[in-house]
Amino acid sequence: MKKRPSMNIGAAILFGIFGLLFFVLMVRFITIQVTGEAEGKVLASQAAEKYIKSRILEAHRGTIYDQKGEVIAEDTSAYTLVAILSPTVTSDPENPKHVTDPKKTARELSGFIDMNESEIYKKLTTDGAYQVEFGSAGRALSHQLMLDIKEEKLPGITFRKEAKRFYPNGTFASHLIGFAQKTTNDDGDSVTTGKMGIEKSFNDILSGKNGSVEYKSDVWGYLLPNSEEHVTPPQDGNDIYLTIDKKIQTFLEEAMNQVQKQYKPKKMYAIVADPKTGKILAMTQRPTFHPDTRAGLMDNWTNTIVEETIEPGSTMKSFSLAAAVNEGKFNPNEAYQSGTYKVDNVPNPIRDHNGGEGWGSISFLEGVQRSSNVAFAYLLDQIGFETFEGYLHDFGFGEPTNVGLPHEASGSILYHYPIEKYTTIFGQGTTVTPLQMIQAESAIANDGKMMKPYVISKVVDPNTKEVVKETKPEVAGTPITKETAEKTRKYLETTVTSEHGTGTRFAIEGYSVAGKSGTAQIPDPETGGYKYGKENYLFSFMGMAPADNPQLIVYVGVQEPELKPTEIGSDPVSDVFKPVMQNSLKYLNIKPQEKVNLKQEQIPDLTGMSVEKAKAEIEKTGGEPVVVGNGSEVIRQLPHEGSEMLEGGKVILRTDGDITIPDMKGWSIRDVFKIANIAGLKINMVGNGFAVSQNIQPDSPVNEDEPLVVNFKTPEEQLQKKKEEEASEGSEEERPLN
């Protein structure tokens, strides 16, 4: 049977079509084989993406320790809650690996995380989602909470483990330490980054470098048999040891919490430092925040001690006094007229803090004790404008301390016009940071050597324990001599021990304290001037102890506390200073002094009493009565009625008879001044220390306005004289007889 021609033609056409298709496929195959690409995509990379899996090995962020190795900030395990929604992960319906009952799951989870049931249910019923997370409510879960949720055996609920920054001490030097939190990079990687404080400033040191692991898998993501893992290990961050002492910091935090609760000030700050090295042993402020939860952070982001400037008030007089002593311009016995001081071409005079009334003609030492602005105005005249400006720079004002914390302020020395120069010497106008004040105070406490403050003790490699970097004590300058520092400490000690000293509230049982209180005006942004009112000040005290060889400096500032009518600004400040200083000294095994009794008593009104009765009343309070005159009735007394007196203090009784002067050998300058004042005598004091001789014979009658000359010598001078006398006597004995 013959084939029709039409069939041959059809077969040929089909053959041609299939041949063309085969040719195209072969060309396509060869092209892919040669180039390794398809539709512009590299097939090897697509295969690797599908079959080669990788995951991040997160580096451990460095731990922050106190100086003794107590943990302050560290990485700990945390968990993120994940719900698998896709049924494709379930191969055995009897053991589902995805969420099968969204309603029940939402109800159970709402009891564990901070999200209501309806919101959780909405998440669990998201269309087309493979898995879902629960935002901040489902992140940073503790290990125990993760175990509690697992016990519910909810299908499809799983966890992703990750590192979380943990601050075990809660509110603890929070603005110094700062905090770190998870952030997401542009490439999608999650990293822990410091956001403030030490965590931010030393982020590069604390941060490690993440590692990774790669392996070949099947299409379901499981590791293929005999395949190799390629691991790049993470590099952990270095550990940081601070100068902070956890025990002293705890003393400080507890005292600050108590004052915050009782007085509700707008702001507070406090620092404890070692003047021998410059180490900051504790520092904190209020308002503060909790670094784990960030609760309270919005009230104050700023590290007040480092970043903010203040007018220091009368605490600045510590350095003004030191400058005057160093220049040889401070004579503690020299008298001046307190009350007011007139600056040329300035309408309003400088006034003392008692409204300009002053205390009459008093010695410069008493002026320091009473915190007299007028006394320091006179001292500036003696020091000289340019010389004193030099001391301001020598003490480090106007320049940052370079402590290594972010945004450190420099302060500003306001010293252009004469009135600014006078106000600067007693702490107004010129601004400083609290940290600058600590640095400057170290010069007085450390025999003239001003120590640069620092907070980082050392940086340690956590793997090798090798010290990568260590901070050594650094002398920032020597603004005054050792002799000046010793004298200044003695003068500042009298502000605490003198009955009319402004620092009497800061006396500590068993320890001698040298320091200076301050009451600084606060600028009023509404008026452009200063705020007024009993509470509208920055009350402060900067003190050191023990006064003869200071081991600690404590500086406390309390701004605008709520005071009762019977309270003064020094009360909340002393409620921080005293327990912190005393507890810290005991903790450091600084032994209390023997025979130090700081019990204070109020002196009664003794005028009109018989001498014998007045003496008995004084002895009841623990004081020592001293009678001036040979009369039988008291007509005047010093200190006055209501004054506070340390136990053992002298109370001078002026009688109605002829004036007589007691034997004042061994008396302090302060007590000699009382005698001259109450007897109305013109006094001329020679030397420093304690009385060794007087021109008026004891118990002999004298006339008012008669000159009283008293010679003083320090204990060192008296000891030296005694040695010279003994040596002279010895040489006389050895001299042969003629």
Image (tube, rainbow, N blue to C red):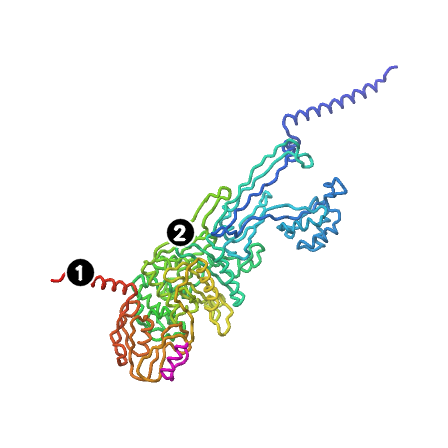
Q: Residues within 10 Å of mark 2 (few under 14, many from 20)?
A: some
Amino acid bearing label 2 = Pro
> Is 167 displayed left or right of 432 in the figure?
right
Q: Position of residue 625 (x, y in %)?
A: 36, 77
Q: Using the image, determine if residue 722 lies above or below residue 672.
A: above
Which image quadrant for residue 278?
Answer: bottom left
Nearer the observer, 352 or 346: 352
Nearer the observer, 7 or 110: 110
Image quarter (top left, top right, bottom left or bottom right) of the N terminus: top right
User: Residue tagged by mark 1?
Assistant: 734
Residue 611 lies within the magenta run: yes
Lower position in the chain sequence, tag 1 or tag 2? 2
Amino acid bearing label 1 = Glu
Q: Position of residue 338 (x, y in %)?
A: 35, 73
Q: Magenta residues, as a range? A: 603-620
Residue 577 lies within the magenta run: no
Which image quadrant for residue 289?
Answer: bottom right
Helix, strand or loop for disc 2: loop
User: Which label number is shown at residue 473?
Assistant: 2
Helix, strand or loop for disc 1: helix
